[in-house]
Image (cartoon, rainbow, N blue to C red):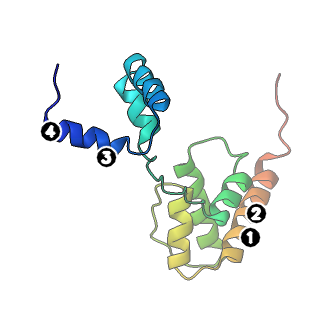
Amino acid sequence: MKLDATQTKLLRTAFKGRSRAELKKLFALIRTSEDRALLAAALPKKKVAPKRKGDPLVRELEQTLKPIMGPSVEKADMLIEHIAKKHRRKLGIEPKGIADAAKRLRASKFTDEQIRAGAQSLMAHLAKLYGDRETVV
């Protein structure tokens, strides 16, 4: 197999400044390795966007409401209903989850402290209602 002028020029520019021994090792490596592995080693790695950190309020709400057994949609509904009763306001919010509830409550002019306090008072209210029940084992 003979190389044409463009292939020869490409090889000379790619391996310029290498010794004969280095080139022999490199050609042996190319013969024994797969294309995918060689390309992964030769090309720069793709930059991955850093992960966004979650909202600390949402993480805290999830921890506070964790004892409630049920999907997060129900937990968010209970939280919104409780905050609406506590602050005597009508909130026409139907959240898709706890994060959505926090976002919509913030949009309704509630502070993070009010939302946290609402979650804690909801847990206290539920404990008062259902905490003294005896369980059958």
Look at the numbered disc 4 and give the secondary structure of its residue.
Answer: helix
Report the side of 117 relative to 69 (left or right). Answer: right
Mark toward the start of the polypeptide (2 vs 4): 4
Q: Quadrant of residue 76?
A: bottom right
Q: Residues within 10 Å of mark 3 (few under 14, many from 20)?
A: few
For the residues marked 1 and 2, what is the alpha-carbon distance in whole angstroms?
A: 5 Å
Residue 23, position as x, y percentages in the image: 43, 30
For the residues marked 3 and 1, what is the alpha-carbon distance in whole angstroms?
A: 68 Å
Look at the numbered disc 2 and give the secondary structure of its residue.
Answer: helix
Q: Residues within 10 Å of mark 4 (few under 14, many from 20)?
A: few
Foreground mark, 3 or 2, reads: 3
**Quarter in which the C terminus is drawn:** top right
Residue 130: image tag? none
Residue 13: image tag? 3
Q: Quadrant of residue 61?
A: bottom right
Can you name the residue that lies furthest to the left here? 4
Task: Name the residue that disc number 4 marks.
Answer: 5
Look at the numbered disc 3 and give the secondary structure of its residue.
Answer: helix
Residue 100, position as x, y percentages in the image: 50, 62
- Kind of residue sitting beneath label 3: Thr
Mark toward the start of the polypeptide (3 vs 4): 4
**Residue that appears at 43% across and 39% down:** 42
Residue 120: image tag? 2
The total of numbered circles placed on residues is 4
For the residues marked 3 and 2, what is the alpha-carbon distance in whole angstroms?
A: 69 Å
Report the side of 104 relative to 112 (left or right). Answer: left
Mark toward the start of the polypeptide (4 vs 1): 4
Task: Name the residue that disc number 1 marks.
Answer: 117
- Above or below for 92 versus 35: below
For the residues marked 3 and 4, what is the alpha-carbon distance in whole angstroms?
A: 12 Å
